[in-house]
Amino acid sequence: MTIAQQIKWDFKANGFLEIRDKNGKIIYFEKSDGDWLKYEYDSQGKVICWENSMGGWRKDSEGNEIYFENSNGIIEDKRIPEIIEHTNGRKYKLIK
């Protein structure tokens, strides 16, 4: 159930649903067809993650795409793994 459905938002009377944080940044947006978007920001106000009703992109504070997953099961993970397995079968743990 979407936020608009939960609060019984009247799209005809009010238009789209938009929720902003205390800094005026949009954190949730929904249209009458049920499509929605959610946003998260870092301490400097840059988008670090957004998700929509079809899936979501995760980004770091520099705006680089690092993770994507959608409702069709497609996953693109560009994060650096903690453990790397060499072709010889040995595993190496990365130090951050």
Image: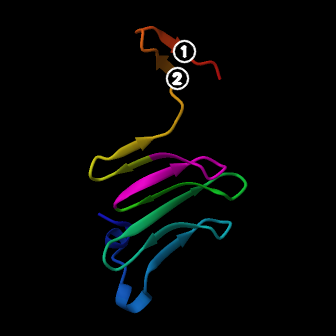
Can residue 58 be found in the magenta stretch? Answer: yes
Q: Amino acid at mark 1?
A: Lys
The circle drawn on residue 73 is none
Residue found at x 33% / y 68%:
6
Can residue 86 be found in the magenta stretch? Answer: no
Mark 2 vs mark 1, CA separation in Å: 6 Å
Counting residues from the start of the chain, the first of labels 2 and 1 encountered is 2
Indicate the position of residue 68 as horizontal and vertical percent values: 43, 48
Residue hosting label 2: 82
Q: Residues within 10 Å of mark 2 (few under 14, many from 20)?
A: few
Q: Amino acid at mark 2?
A: Glu
Indicate the position of residue 18 as horizontal and vertical percent values: 50, 75
User: From the viewer's perspective, is residue 87 above or below residue 5?
Assistant: above
User: From the viewer's perspective, is residue 48 above or below residue 6?
Assistant: above
- Left or right: 58 as drawn, with respect to 61: left
Asked which quadrant contains residue 40, the reply is: bottom right
Element class at badge 2 = loop
- Left or right: 43 as drawn, with respect to 12: right
Residue found at x 53% / y 60%:
39
Indicate the position of residue 64 as horizontal and vertical percent values: 59, 49
Q: Are marks 2 and 1 in contact (CB under 8 Å)?
A: yes
Q: How many marks?
A: 2
In the picture as drawn, the residue positioned furthest to the front comes out as 87
Quadrant of the snapshot with the N terminus? bottom left
Residue found at x 45% / y 8%:
90
The circle drawn on residue 93 is 1
- Left or right: 2 as drawn, with respect to 15: left
User: From the viewer's perspective, is residue 73 above or below residue 29?
Assistant: above
Part of the protein shown in magenta: 54-67
